[in-house]
Structures are given as C-alpha cells and as structure tokens.
Image (cartoon, rainbow, N blue to C red):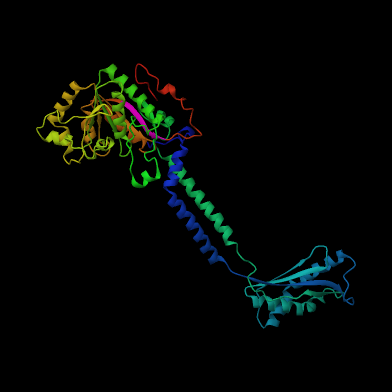
Amino acid sequence: MEETKEIRLDEISIWCILRDVVRNAWVVVLAVVAAYLGIAGVLGLLYEPVYTSSATLAVTARGNSGGAYSSLNITTQMADVFTEVFQSDVLREQIALDMGRDSVSGEITVSVISETNLVTLQVTSLTPQDAYEMIQSALRNYEGVSDYLFSNARLQIVQSPQIPYGPSNVQNIRRYQRLGMLGAGALVVACIALFNIMRFTVKTRKSAERNLDGRILGEIPFEQKYHSWKEALHRSKQALLIQSPAVSMQFAEALRRASARIEQHMRRRGQKVLIVTSIGENEGKSSVAANLAIALAEKGRRVLLVDGDLKKPAQYRVFDQQDAKLIQLSEWLESGKTFKGLLHFEKKSGIFCIFQKTSVRASGRLLKSDKMKSLMEACREQVDFIVIDTPPLAEVSDGELLLAYGDCALVVTRQDWVDVRILNDTADTVRQSQSEFLGFLLNAFHRDRLSALSRYGNYRHYRGSQEVPDGR
C-alpha cells in the first residue's frame, strides 16, 4: 500500500517555502510575463470596437416652441413613449430604407435625464459612419412613427449628433493585465509552497522526531559561509570550524553539545571509531566530521580524523591544506611507506589527520584491502577516538565498506534535502552493518522566527544522560 503523508503545521517551514520561491523566481516571473502577454493577446482577439453617436433632445409641446411641459411627470411619460418610438421595428425599417439598405445592425437607445424634460438619443454601430448616418436618419423619420401614437408633443434638438472619432467601448487592458499578473504570480507561489509542503523531507525538528526512524543527536543551525559580498563574488570562504572566531556561538555550541553526547555514549560502550556519513552530497558531512573531531580534542582526547572519501575528498580543503605536501591515504595504501609519514598533526585544531586530495578510481579495492585493516587496527592503539568521513551512501559503495571499520555511525541530514523514506532505509543499512547506528544529526537548519522557541527552549534535548536519549 502506498504511504501517504499527513500534513502537520509543526512540520511546515516558512523558510523552506521562501527559499523554494526564491530559487524558482524565474518560474514566477515567467508566469507573470505569460499572463501579461496572454491577456493582451486574448482580449485583442475578442475585442470588437463599436462607435456611438449621441444627441440631446428636449420634449416640448406642439405649438409651444420654447416651453417645457408644466409637469415633469407628463414629460417623463412622453419621454418613455419616445423611447418606444426610437426602438421600434417600424423606425428601423424606415432608417434602413433611408440609408438604402435591407437592414441596419446598430443599436438605438434612449435615456431620460433625471428631473428634466431632456432625453439622450444614442446610436451604436460597428463603424463611426453608420452610427452617425443612423442617428441622423432616426431624427428625420421619427415623427412619421410618433404621429401614430400621439400628436401633442415633439422633440427639439438641444445638442446635435457628431461623428464619433473613437470607439465607445475602450477596454481597460492594463487593469486586466495587472489582475492577471497578480493572479498568475500568486498561483505559482501557492503551487511552489504546496509542493514544498508535500515534499516528504525533514524541514523542522518536530518532523525529524516524528518521521525519522532513529534518535536525533542534535540540531546544527545554518551558518553563513560568505561574510561579505566580496567573498561571495570571489567564492572565497573560510571553513566552518568551531575554533574559528568567525562562526557564531550557536553553531559552535550546537556541535560541542552533539560531540559531548556522542563521546559519552562511545565511552560507556568502549567504542573508538565513529563513522560520519550522509545520503547525498552537500549535506555538510565533512564539516560536521571535522568539527566533531575538534570538539573531542578540546577535551584533551587524542583524536584522528580520516578522510575516507577517496572519490571526492574534502578535508584537505576544510583545513586549508591545498598546497601542503602530504602523503595521501590512497598513496600510502598502494605503497610501502611507513605509518609515520601518513599522519598529519593540525596544531591549531589539536587533532591528527589523514588526508586525501585526489580522486581514486579503484577506491573500493583500497578500502577493503588488508593494509587498510591493519591501518585502522594500528590507529586504534595510538589514539582515543577515530572519526572517519565517508562518501555519501547513496553515491558510491565506499561508505558501506567503511562501516565495517566503525564501532558506531551517525547520518548527517540537511534540512529539506533528502526524502525521509530514503533516510530511514539508510538507517536500516547502517543497522545491518558492524557499526551501531547512533542516530541522525540535523545540519544547516534554519529556524523560523515565528515558530521558534526561545534560544534555550530546547535545552532538554541536549542535557547529558546515561545513554543517548531517544528523540522520537
């Protein structure tokens, strides 16, 4: 049976929605432009201009050329009768005969000006010439029809009709375009928000606790890599290490708390080797592995950080060792060099590192070799803790090979990055290996201002305990 996702308000992240809207801003712009051009095109095809010629007439009594009826009520009644006259079929036939046509298609309307004896005669047609000729013909021939109805009143022209110079049904296309653009943009934004909500990923801590099949080891807040526009343009960024004064206190303390909980668990179980892995790329796994190693070293532990990603190594960039002459892990495994030259001590961080700088094709063969096994056994005797940065489990099989060397493993998951079902399948994969599955470490999480608790509101999640507490 297909699994359905239940929508909960505490699993919706406003920041994730806004991020998706910004990322898909081109779609919003495209929809707005399409609405603008589409409305102009459709209205242009449907629009048929008409022209109106009008005249103002006064209802007067015969024999009294200048006076109005003494009673406005009688005037209004007479005006109503003239309305019937101008809209009668008999007059239309007379107008058609007068214009030399079989029939006329224009519309004749008469309206009474309130509280006066004045009426407005309007003729609307498809061309300005037809409108003008029809109203002139109507004024010439109406008496022949009205005499059959009454003979004691007539119409006196107050304002003569004119040839219309423009259509009378001018469209307000701009207004429709503005409304259409607004509606199209709002619809696309709503669709983007709906897709974000329906995407089954971890967007909030509540959703992680509710949907992930494992413990939540901590929540690492998002840390800006670029600190100025100049750095962003030149893509010059500093590594996000907790020892750097450039990182925020929230970021550093979140990693130290997570490290303390992991260390306590490992020491109680007599474990030494921690596997740090993830599902996909760019989830911050390498940065987390380096910071966990540094946090352990800050407590006086002898810590070794191993870059086990032989396909896309990253630790040499994290510690700014691009130009350093180092013995790589792959070189050591393929050669007969001594163990001494492999380890590099980072004085600033206080940890030992085994770096890899180039990509290796036959990485699986090297990682499962006897020499790799002997290396890990030797390292266990030399240091207190070993942190291994592995390749993403969904990318290559090297990560599963490295699980065989670990005592415990954690999965780093970035906010709104990987499907929850894939995360839970990965947790099952780790459980089936020789490493104990510690849980998930939430990384690069933006906390919405409206829904966030106070800065220390989640302190209960980080308090020390005898075991790693169940976050579910």
- In the figure, 469 relative to 189: above or below? above
Left or right: residue 50 versus residue 297 is right
Q: Main secondary structure of the magenta part?
A: strand
In the image, residue 168 sits, relative to residue 209, either above or below, namely: below
Q: Name the quadrant containing residue 401.
A: top left
Q: Nearer the viewer, residue 81 or 50?
A: 50
Residue 440 colored magenta?
Answer: yes
Question: Looking at this view, is 57 or 30 the one in front?
Answer: 30
Quarter location, residue 416: top left
Q: Residue at x 31, y 34 (%)?
A: 287
Q: Which image quarter holds the C terminus?
A: top left
In the rendered image, residue 368, in percent from the top left (x then y), is placed at 16, 32
Residue 130 covered by magenta stretch = no
Vertical side of 217 occupied by 167: above or below: below
Q: Measuring from the top left, give residue 271's x and y in whole percent.
A: 25, 20
Q: Is residue 255 left or right of residue 163?
A: left
Q: Nearer the viewer, residue 305 or 161?
A: 305
Please state the horizontal and vertical placement of residue 105, each as a whole percent of the image. Answer: 65, 74
**439 and 315: which one is in front?**
315
Residue at 53 percent of width and 52 percent of height: 183
Counting from the top left corner in percent of width and height, residue 233 is at 36, 47
Residue extending furthest toward the left? 336
Among the 4 quarters of the image, the one containing residue 351: top left
Tell me where the magenta segment starts and ends, as one range: 438-445
Q: How many marks?
A: 0
User: Position of 151 compared to 245: left or right?
Assistant: right
- Indicate the quadrant containing the N terminus: top left, top right, bottom left or bottom right: top left
